[in-house]
Image (cartoon, helix red, strand yellow):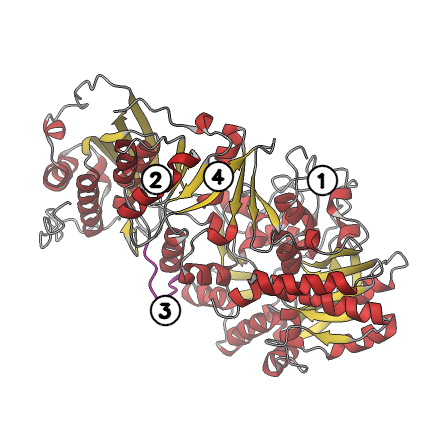
């Protein structure tokens, strides 16, 4: 586990009295940019690759297949219950690598800051990135900083690109999904969406809902180490569980049947969704995934995932059947059936 | 979750479904008024669980669907003005006008905000005295009291930078209009529980009597809906035509009196155009003379320009229960939620959108 107290009590290394906010010159490539890199980024994110101080990072050739992915992160507010944009930008990319069955190794970090962004805010985000990288066992090996003209309230956008290594021979992906596969959901859904929504709108509920923002690679590597025959995985991020399933149904050419009443949703998340007229199946998550395994491996996979996340138990939510349709059907407790579909845009709260 | 999970409990729903199967001897056509009910019926797959003799028809109770194109064009024109901050409920932002929707206007750099309550819009006006803040007031009797409170608050605070584009509509006149049509084939109604929570049930008695039709005030959960259908079928099979209240946990006979008082204080009843149906006399609410300075149409001198609906679209017939969405030749082909031809495909509560979302077969 990372040492969470490592940077505790450390002051923001950029003298706040001089630059309490990001100015255009922080992106000029000159002295102020160098100050940010030397005094803020390097001490927190330090590793031998970054220490090369070159235009790019020289990586060791792993002699295995490698997986590469990229993700840009935009979230308002930058800090929300259970996470922040820094954590999100590391875990998001780490999780995409994990879903391919890869061991996450190296990340690039690209910051686009709006003029006026608070220096203290940036410092907190960088520390959070450092912690998340350590927790995920990845190195930030190269980076970039740009500042754009102020248009809003000092936005911060982060792009991370990740490279991971494939250290096994299993073929994992939508095309490997087979009829008869069990579909496992790794925990309860909707937490991230409600955490962000409630902090953006200034709403509070009886119990505070924390984002599920978390790294998934450990669970996945654990499954692989135990020879679980994984056919496919996908994290349920934007668009939620339903969108992940519908995409996989289309990509695999298969039909999935889901039992609605077994999909775990925290009562507070459920209540908040009811209040806004939102469907928890479509609420964003940042630490949940669906897993497709043959029936023979399902129980053991379930057990392993549950050991990794005891608080939010994983469960089998459905299966892949022989129906000749590329779609997902949700069956409710009284036998009613509905088709899950992609949303046209974002979910919008209802009027009455 | 209390008051929700009990009403989604499979055992209870099944018991009532069994009872419906037992008592149904004839063919009956029942219309649920509210788009929220339509949505729940399709989401829970309730139509398929009812006897084949019962057909559910989907009514005009979707505020987004019935807001006429001319009003949406006015909203787009207002929102396009550089001095205006335009506030709307989220669902309205995606509704296309003649050639674009409010989200596209936002993308062009105009200040358009999604709000959860009209009070939020008043607050935005208070915080931004240099901006003209306009709230798009749409909806049925459910949202009208909060809108009335908001405009009253603006008046009390002597705000001069707040106004409303009002397109409020009323349910009973629409029911009467549908029943007066010669083509009407409706045997019973499920009235909207939340509308009656505000307005009470009394105004439905003369309708049930005049048109000899049962009206069941019904809630929105699966158990509410099957119970509403059960009460309706029981009346029909017994030859009765009365107003009955299924949504007892929320609806009082007289409704919510303070809410009704606020509505009376701020609004007057006006003729209103319904998208796909046409103008229905006395079917809408507009601000009365005491609040006229908060009327955006008045303040910005907006005039209406008629905008024609695509000819192929049958949404008017769907809203009156004369056709089902999948009977439309454009359904799922030329008309989808991404490129809707008519009102009912636009809103998530619209009947066509609900059919598209839950019922479309892959081939369709």
Mark 4 burial class by Cα count in 10 Å: few <14, some 14-19, many 20+:
many
The residue wearing badge 1 is: B331
* Badges 3 and 4, same chain: yes
Q: Give the magenta range.
A: A201-211
Using the rendered image of the protein, determine whether residue B288 is visible from the camera's viewpoint: no
The residue wearing badge 2 is: A301
**Tag 2 near tag 3, CB within 8 Å:** no
Gap in angstroms between the C-alphas marked 4 and 2 = 19 Å
Q: Nearer the viewer, mark 4 or mark 1?
A: 4
* Left or right position of B155 against B246: left
The residue wearing badge 4 is: A245
Badge 4 marks a residue whose secondary structure is helix
* Badges 3 and 1, same chain: no
State the residue at coordinates (37%, 51%).
A192
The answer to which of marks 2 and 3 sits earlier in the sequence is 3
State the residue at coordinates (34%, 37%).
A72
The residue wearing badge 3 is: A206
The answer to which of marks 3 and 4 sits earlier in the sequence is 3
């Amino acid at each position: 586990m990372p040492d969470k107290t490592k940077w505790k009590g450390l002051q923001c290394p950029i003298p706040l009295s001089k630059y309490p906010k990001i100015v255009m010159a922080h992106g000029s490539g000159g002295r102020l940019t160098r100050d940010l890199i030397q005094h803020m980024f390097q001490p927190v994110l330090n590793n031998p690759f970054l220490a090369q101080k070159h235009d790019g990072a020289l990586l060791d050739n792993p002699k295995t297949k490698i997986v590469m992915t990229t993700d840009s992160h935009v979230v308002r507010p930058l800090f929300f219950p259970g996470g922040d944009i820094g954590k999100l930008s590391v875990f998001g990319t780490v999780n995409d690598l994990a879903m391919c069955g890869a061991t996450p190794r190296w990340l690039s970090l690209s910051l686009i800051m709006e003029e006026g962004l608070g220096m203290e805010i940036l410092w907190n985000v960088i520390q959070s990135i450092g912690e998340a990288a350590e927790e995920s066992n990845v190195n930030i090996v190269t980076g970039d900083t740009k500042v754009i003209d102020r248009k809003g309230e000092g936005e911060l956008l982060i792009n991370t690109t990740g490279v991971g290594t494939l250290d096994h021979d299993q073929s994992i992906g939508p095309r490997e999904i087979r009829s008869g596969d069990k579909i496992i959901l790794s925990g309860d859904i909707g937490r991230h969406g409600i955490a962000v929504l409630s902090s953006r709108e200034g709403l509070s509920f009886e119990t505070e809902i924390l984002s599920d923002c978390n790294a998934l690679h450990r669970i996945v590597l654990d499954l692989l180490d135990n020879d679980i025959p994984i056919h496919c995985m996908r994290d349920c991020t934007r668009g939620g569980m339903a969108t992940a399933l519908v995409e996989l149904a289309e990509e695999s050419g298969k039909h999935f049947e889901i039992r609605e009443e077994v999909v775990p949703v925290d009562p507070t998340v459920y209540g908040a969704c009811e209040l806004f007229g939102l469907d928890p199946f479509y609420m964003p998550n940042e630490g949940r995934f669906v897993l497709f395994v043959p029936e023979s491996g399902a129980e053991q996979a379930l057990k392993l995932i549950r050991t990794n996340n005891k608080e939010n138990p994983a469960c089998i939510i459905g299966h892949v059947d022989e129906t000749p349709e590329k779609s997902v059907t949700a069956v409710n407790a009284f036998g009613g059936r509905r088709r899950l579909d992609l949303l046209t845009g974002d979910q919008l709260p209802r009027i009455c | 979750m209390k008051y929700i999970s009990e009403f989604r409990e499979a055992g209870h729903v099944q018991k009532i479904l069994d009872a419906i199967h037992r008592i149904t001897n004839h063919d009956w056509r029942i219309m649920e008024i509210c788009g929220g009910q339509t949505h729940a019926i399709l989401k829970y797959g309730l139509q398929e669980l009812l006897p084949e003799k019962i057909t559910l028809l989907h009514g005009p109770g979707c505020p987004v669907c019935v807001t006429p194109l001319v009003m949406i064009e006015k909203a787009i024109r207002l929102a396009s003005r550089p001095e205006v901050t335009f506030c709307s409920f989220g669902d309205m932002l995606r509704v296309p006008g003649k050639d674009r929707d409010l989200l596209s206007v936002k993308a062009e750099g105009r200040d358009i905000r999604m709000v959860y309550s009209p009070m939020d819009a008043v607050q935005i006006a208070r915080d931004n005295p240099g901006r003209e803040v306009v709230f798009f007031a749409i909806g049925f009797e459910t949202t009208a009291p909060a809108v009335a409170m908001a405009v009253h608050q603006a008046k009390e605070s002597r705000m001069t930078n707040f106004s409303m584009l009002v397109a409020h509509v009323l349910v009973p006149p629409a029911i009467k209009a549908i029943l007066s049509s010669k083509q009407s084939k409706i045997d019973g109604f499920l009235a909207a529980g939340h509308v009656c929570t505000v307005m009470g049930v009394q105004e439905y008695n003369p309708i049930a009597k005049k048109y000899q039709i049962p009206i069941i005030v019904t809630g929105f959960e699966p158990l509410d809906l099957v119970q509403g259908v059960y009460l309706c079928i029981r009346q029909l099979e017994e030859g009765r035509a009365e107003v009955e209240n299924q949504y007892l946990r929320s609806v009082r006979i007289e409704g919510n009196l303070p809410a009704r008082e606020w509505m009376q204080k701020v609004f007057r009843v006006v003729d209103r155009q319904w998208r796909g149906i046409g103008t229905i006399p006395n079917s809408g609410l507009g601000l009365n003379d005491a609040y006229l300075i908060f009327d955006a149409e008045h303040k910005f001198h907006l005039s209406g320009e008629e905008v024609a609906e695509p000819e192929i679209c049958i949404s008017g017939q769907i809203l009156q229960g004369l056709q089902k969405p999948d009977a439309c030749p454009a359904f799922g082909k030329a008309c989808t939620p991404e490129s809707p031809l008519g009102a009912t495909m636009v809103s998530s509560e619209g009947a066509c959108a609900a059919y598209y979302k839950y019922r479309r077969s892959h081939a369709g």
